Amino acid sequence: MSESVNQQPVPLHEHGQRRPMKKRLWWIAISPSVWAIHFLACYITAAVWCEKIGEGNLRPLQISVGIYTAIALPVIIWVGYSSYRNFRRGDPPVPYDFDDPTDRTHFFGFTAFLLSSLSVVATLFTVLVFVLVGSCD
Amino acid sequence: MKDPRADRLLKAWETPKGWRYWSAVNNSEVGLWYTLTAFAFFLFGGVLALIMRVQLALPDNDWLTPDQYNQIFTMHGSVMMFLFAVPILEAISIMLLPEMLGARDLPFPRLSAYGYWCFLIGGVFVCGSLLFGVGPRGGWFMYPPMTTEYQDGIGPDIWLLGLSFIEIASIAAAVELIVGVLKCRPPGMRLNLIPLYAWYILVVAVMILFAFPPLIAGDLLMELERAMDWPFFDVERGGDPMLWQHLFWIFGHPEVYIVFLPSIALVAMMVPTFARTPMAGYGWIVLAAVGTGFLSFGLWVHHMFTTGLPGISIGIFSAASEAVAIPTGVQIFCFIATLLVGRVQRNVCLKFILAGLATFIIGGLTGVMVAIAPFDYQAHDTYFIVGHLHYVLIGGTIFPIVAGFYYYYPFVTGKQLSERLGNITFWLMLIGFNVAFFPMHIAGLMGMPRRVYTFPGGMGFEWPNLISSIGAFGLGAGFLVLLWDVFRPKGKQPLVPRNVWNAGTLEWSGEVPDQPWGIRSIPIINSRYPLWEQENLRADIDAGNFYLPDAEEGRRETLVTSAVDAELMQCLRVPGPSFLPFWAAVFTGGVFIFSTYHWWIPAGCCSALSFATIVTWLWTGTAEIPEKETKPVGLDQSLPLYVSGPAAVGWWAMFITMLGDMTAFISLVFGYFFYWTVHEDFLPEQWNGEPVVGAGTIWPLVSVGLAVVAWCAVVMARRLNRGNHSVGFYSSSLLAVAATVASGAALVWGPYSNGLDPTVHVYSSTTGVLVLWTVVHLALGATMLVYCIARRLFGKMDAMHDADIVNVTLGWHFLLLTVAITGSVLALFPWVA
């Protein structure tokens, strides 16, 4: 499978183009990290609210979570979108196993795109709790 | 052997003989000892399980006393998790990873050896306690207040200190593996080409780095409570046992994936070989590994659903527990897809892989069930959970490891295990396992509680338990056959051909029997399955046509490459055999073991000896100035022998270690804010008639100011050293040492002058532990500076060769952060609160 793919020439026009994640391993960790920060922020806010302040009315807590989400989701989606553009550029063939910096970048882009998609789902899962659960207990 | 280069190489990598064999530090020897020791602990844990099953075979059985049963179930869990599941992954990785990456060894072989000896000493100490009837009895999770107030004796101390010791060794292995994967790959092996095993191990090692420190922090708190009466978990003095549960499970849930992912990594190496095709969905598997690694840190509260936390918090963790099923499932689909597109070769290995996947899926599905809080309320603390967790761990971890035994046995010994015995083993284990653990789900749903030494007759528990006990012995018999197969004499059995499974990855390029050099010459890699896809590769490796085919100076050397694209950076000289790691581990072990019995004088002596041994090890074995700056490594390429800063493996090790260290510190800070969150009276003026005081405002801030001065002086010292200003370097370093000592003194003076008594209330003890942690780190920071001064004085560090001070500066960045956080929390937060 890979041998036949390897025989195809690498699209040379890509070498000169700007590549957002170039040599950055940490690029693939951005989206899940944003999920983690969002998750932690929601958990801490909920814990402090329910222990220290909240009786009955969850609206302020829901608004806070809404604000966190309004920051987190666009970041994840932006990372996912630029990763998508990055790995689709030049319509490279899967499985991104050329010995070539461009294909390494395709691979990073593909992985970052998948991780961003997973992070979107996981973030929405967290948000859903605040939509569906109406009280601290 | 005709080639004189090969002779020299062989001599450099020769395994020591006779009693000096035990001074070996090479990954093949240490990896083998590690694997065998972990397997021995596994068998011990298995025997404990069988003893429990005998006890539970019949109702109202009094074969074991409740106390014996408590010790046995505690040790079964602790041994399986801490002495088998985590160490076996480190063992297998130490043994295999360098071979998969075409490296001669991991970058810090003596650290691996030190980790191994720590593991052996700690493990024997913890297990030995059982033989004297003083083993821990609080379950593998050691919940307070049971373990702090209701259990006398030294059992919990043995658990806390013995296992902390092993956890430190695990973090050492994590450092080794992260640096190994990122910096010791063969030239050309970009990150999109590395074996999937390396991806998984990278993720797992990073997880260890962030998961183990919270437990170490928890161990520290609980030991301080037990030994010094600091009331972290004592409700009467403002403490809260829930903090332990948080810290334990922040470790404990990622731990499940820490033991699962490396085993599934073995599956990811075996499936392409047996399907005879590259893995389908390489990128998807990387998604699964990295995604699981992240999400697994958002699950810990699902072990605490019944502790009375706010429903909304439970909801968040329930949602994350469902989300983690997505990446976990993705990799299983990839394996199935690969097997479907390939031409599958059937053997015992593959049977174990398939059985493992099927079993894990069943365990995973019951996992999704118990992640739903209302169901968990019903199933919590019943045998349903015991059934669930064994399906996950045996399916996800044990079966793949047994498959790995069959697969990699020829790699280690040159001989093959028997297919006939393998089939017997397989069916005994598969049937025995299901017969043992499936009925536990039913017993659990009928209401049978876990961790109770017997059960009454007439409640319907008799048959499920008897069947479970019979199945457990079937499973045990399977392991007995495997044991016989592994250790039976194989003298007459012929050696296997090279690359016996016709695999595509680099670890199979070695000769049979394998030579101690790891690989004859380090190849250039440009594909994921080099043995399948790169023509003539093995012949070129054998002919020494690639890098480092020689050891002209008789030194052990390997290549260091860049983290992403594996471009050549350095020829790294790795240390050879030495007893230093062994003695360092013996003395470090002494500190922990003697402390358990409160024998402070021997513990202090061991501490001094351990310090002296480790300094000798660092002094003689690290950052050595080479006799020449560069050396030819083959293929007309010359590489530097000495590098410092981010190019050096030592810098990476320091960075990674400090990340782990920071995580433990943040866990303690989390404790401070946890108490503030859950208690209205976290900062009382008085408690039980005694004043409750903190560190005050001024002195913690003075401490931060002095730490800033020290940090500036350290950064200056690094610069002055690089500019070769001797006097400037010494003055700046001495200023830094003085400011560090003053910073520590100021931090202690605050609480001391206020008359702080850590035993009065949890606010005082939390302040005390933050001060203690920071002062110990300041002392380490000062010691490192004195070390650098001595290095330069004795000509072991100069302007060109400055790795020591560069690494110490890096450590100091983290130290400054530690002091700044401690100082500002202690001084300012009481005002905010």
Image: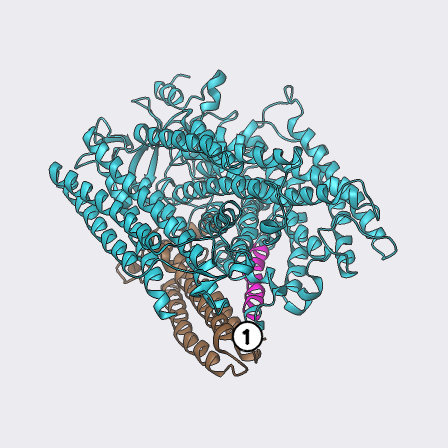
Q: Label 1: few (<14), some or many (≥20) within 10 Å?
A: many
Q: Is residue B75 left or right of residue B803?
A: right
Is A29 situated above or below B171? below
Tell me where the magenta segment starts and ends, as one range: B315-334
Which residue is more in the foreground, A36 or B714? B714
Which residue is more in the foreground, A67 or B595? B595
Percent across and percent down for residue B357 are 64, 51
Instruction: Give the labeled residue for mark 1.
Output: A129
- Please report, as a chain letter, where disc 1 is located: A
Percent across and percent down for residue B480 are 71, 33
Name the tint of chain B in the rendering.
cyan
Q: Which chain is brown?
A: A
Question: Which picture quadrant has residue B362?
Answer: bottom right
Which residue is more in the foreground, B491 or B749? B749
Our reading of the magenta stretch's main secondary structure is helix
Which residue ends up furthest to the right in the rendered image? Answer: B458
Question: Which picture quadrant has residue B731?
Answer: top left
Percent across and percent down for residue B493 are 64, 22
Image quadrant holding the C terminus of chain B, namely bottom left
